[in-house]
Amino acid sequence: MNAKGLLGFVLLFDIVAVLILYPRLDLFSCGYLVLSTVLALLQALVSQRFSKSPEIQRLFYAKDIDKVWDRYVPVLGFAEFAVFFEYARWRPVPELLQHALQMLGLLLCIVGVIWLAWVDSYLIDAFPSHFRRGALMTCGPYRFVRHPRYVGLLATRLSLPLIFGSVIAWLLAAIWILLIHRRAHLEERYLLSKFGAEYTTYASRVPSLL
């Protein structure tokens, strides 16, 4: 999805989400919507910056490495409407909704969005030059973790069931964990085939966390 398409999707998503959540538009539900919108706008900015080079864009989004990701991510996005419905109008397991867990979830989402903002601001500048030189990325956030974007994304996805205390959201989080773990594994295999011993050395000293 290009930047304009993503922005249109975000606008439509937020309108529908507000209509569903209207009986329970509180700190947690509104906070999550604001943070998820910020995250989507950040992704639109990244997509726009790489749109002039389809080759760089394909590699950045691992289009040739993972054929499954783009099919499931939009479905998981739309499935969040069911989470919002459960939060506002239907509570099959009310014990899951705990104020302390909601606060933890909101904090986790804030940290995840801030982390992703830093990672993507670094990648906007560094990724094209590394691509042209055929160099392995080991600086910036890559000094701390091998897959910084996926770590940040996982944090925001795990915040969803904590904030909304939702059975559906926990099921979605489990699917996200599987998808992110699979994608990280595929990228590890690609990087190992491309950089060989250099990547093995890097991976031996920097954790994956996935």
Image (spheres, rainbow, N blue to C red):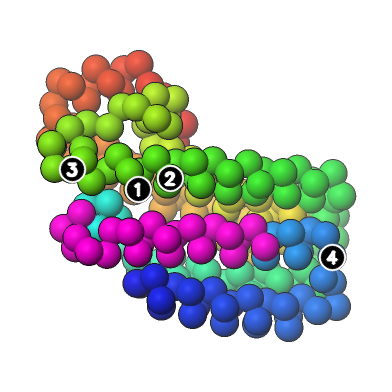
Q: Which residue is mark 1?
A: 124
Cα distance between the residues tagged 2 and 1: 5 Å
Amino acid type of the residue tagged 4 in the rendering: Asp
Residue 43 lies, in percent from the top left, at 44, 59
Q: Position of residue 108 (x, y in %)?
A: 67, 43
On the image, numbered disc 2 is attached to which residue?
121
The answer to if 186 sits in the magenta stretch is no
Does the CB distance between marks 4 and 3 fall below 8 Å?
Answer: no
Q: Relative to 144, is 7 above or below?
A: below
Mark before the other along the chain sequence, 1 or 4: 4
Mark 3, residue position: 131
Nearer the observer: mark 4 or 3; the answer is: 3
Segment colored magenta? 34-56
Q: Which residue is mark 4?
A: 26
How far apart marks 4 and 2 lie (CA) works out to 31 Å
Residue 209 point in image, percent of width and height: 46, 31
Q: Residue at x 73, y 49 (%)?
A: 106
| Horizontal arrangement in the rendering, residue 112 relative to residue 96 (left or right) | left
> Circles 2 and 1: CB distance less than 8 Å?
yes
Q: Mark 1 falls on what kind of element?
A: helix
